[in-house]
Amino acid sequence: MEQLNPATAVATNGGERPRGRPFEPGNPGRPRGARNKRTILVEAWLGDKAEALIDKLMEIALKGDSAALRFCVARLLGPRRDHPVEFEVPDISTAADALNAARGVIGACAEGTLSPRDANEVVDLISKIRALEIGDFEARLTELERQRNG
């Protein structure tokens, strides 16, 4: 049976498009600045009504419609991005230090210095420091056992 090259094989849909890899090697993808077809269609459909539609949506949101308000805020503010947070963290060299640092972070959250999300992320980092410390402890214990048996 003859083997076909997937790059040159003809599709069974009338032979119009090659199967496998229809693009040339090194295809750069969508050109910079190229717009989505759906966006272009929606903009053409809205035409000059887009501004009036936005004004009406803002009016409904300002009257207290929570769904319209959420939509407006989501579009105006966009997704939350990470931002630097400054606060004091003690040196963490023991398990007790890690526990005290976590308590401090939770206290900062309670005071309003850190958001709950930021506090959660920092406590997660502290727990990762503990995981590294446990790995170091395990390596030292293994070395001691090797010396003892050895």
Image (cartoon, rainbow, N blue to C red):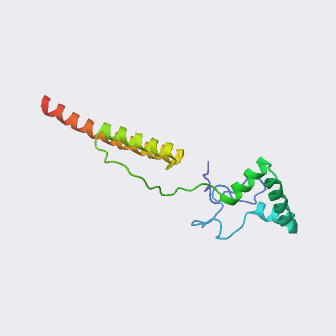
What residue appears at the point 18 percent right and 31 percent down from the top-left corner? 145
Against 111, is 52 above or below?
below
* Residue 106 placement (x, y as % from top left): 46, 41
Q: Position of residue 15 (x, y in %)?
A: 75, 58
Residue at 83% x, 58% y is 59
Measured as percent of width and height from the top left, residue 38 is found at: 78, 60
Hey, which quadrant is residue 105 in on the image? top left
- Figure quadrant of the C terminus: top left
Left or right, 76 with reference to 14: left
Residue 9 or residue 122, whichever sits in front: 122
Indicate the quadrant where residue 34 lies. bottom right
Q: Residue furthest front?
A: 111
Residue 41, horizontal then vertical, whole percent: 82, 63
Res. 80 in view? yes
Query: In the image shown, does 8 or 55 lie closer to the viewer?
Result: 55
Q: Compared to 95, does 83 lie above or below?
A: below
> Residue 12: in sight, yes or no?
no
Q: Is residue 111 above or below residue 4?
A: above
Name the side, left or right, on which 84 lies relative to 16.
left
Residue at 74%, 56% (x, y): give it.
72
Between 143 and 18, the residue placed more toward the observer is: 143
